[in-house]
Image: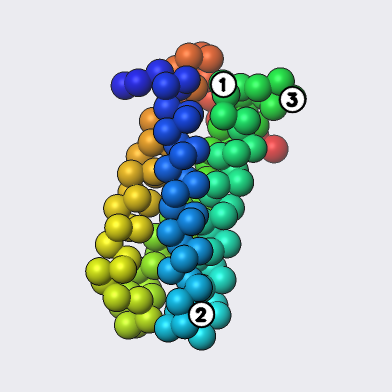
Amino acid sequence: MPDAKGLTTGVWQLAHELSEQVLELTAKPALRCRGFFADQMSDAAVSALASIAATGGAIPVSGISTIEYIGELRAARNSLTVLAKQLGRAVDRGYVAESDAAGIAEKVDELQGLVLMLTLAIRRNTGLNGVRRTA
């Protein structure tokens, strides 16, 4: 498994590319007129990027604890899950062509895996394996 430092730049870059693709897709008239899907998809993509950006792109940065860092990554994974579900629903209902959604779905899957790997690497490197956040 790659170390946490080696993953951060790739994770942020992929999240940025994903948010750009989702914003482009949701701006298309066929989906834009379905406001709920367009809004939830674009909000989820931007939220995932914001959560990843909140980590500062470093392992953990000053002003953010390791637990907070992991919490931001958890929020990013949750946003990606919402995006994947809404994208699937939009395809199922015919609001988005499967060919238009395929590249985005692949990027969501890849990013979810990278965020999970980053979380596990941070836990391993900081001795937080098995520690759960309470509050």
Indicate the colouring scheme.
rainbow
- Distance, label 1 to label 3, CA atoms, is 12 Å
Q: Secondary structure at mark 1?
A: loop
Question: Of discs 2 and 3, which sits in the foreground?
Answer: 2
Say which residue appears at 47% left-offset and 66% top-offset: 24
- Distance, label 1 to label 2, CA atoms, is 38 Å
Among numbered discs 1 and 2, the one appearing first in the sequence: 2
The image position of residue 38, as x and y in percent, is: 51, 73
Say which residue appears at 30% left-offset and 58% top-offset: 103
Residue type at mark 1 is Ile
Q: Is residue 89 above or below residue 74?
A: below
Residue type at mark 3 is Gly
Q: Secondary structure at mark 3?
A: loop
For label 1, the crowd category at 10 Å Cα-Cα, with few meaning under 14, some 14 to 19 and many 20 or more, is some
Q: Which mark is residue 130?
A: none
Q: Is residue 44 above or below residue 67?
A: below
Q: Could you tell me if the residues under marks 1 and 3 are in contact, i.e. CB atoms within 8 Å?
A: no
Q: Could you tell me if the residues under marks 1 and 2 are in contact, i.e. CB atoms within 8 Å?
A: no
Among numbered discs 2 and 3, the one appearing first in the sequence: 2
Q: Secondary structure at mark 2?
A: helix
For label 2, the crowd category at 10 Å Cα-Cα, with few meaning under 14, some 14 to 19 and many 20 or more, is some
The residue that mark 1 highlights is 59
The residue that mark 2 highlights is 32
Say which residue appears at 69% left-offset and 38% top-offset: 135
The image position of residue 107, as x and y in percent, is: 35, 50
Q: Is residue 57 left or right of residue 62?
A: left
Identify the image quadrant of residue 113.
top left
Residue 62 appears in view: yes
The residue that mark 3 highlights is 63
In depth, the one of 59 and 32 nearer the eye is 32
Tell how many labels. 3
Residue type at mark 2 is Arg
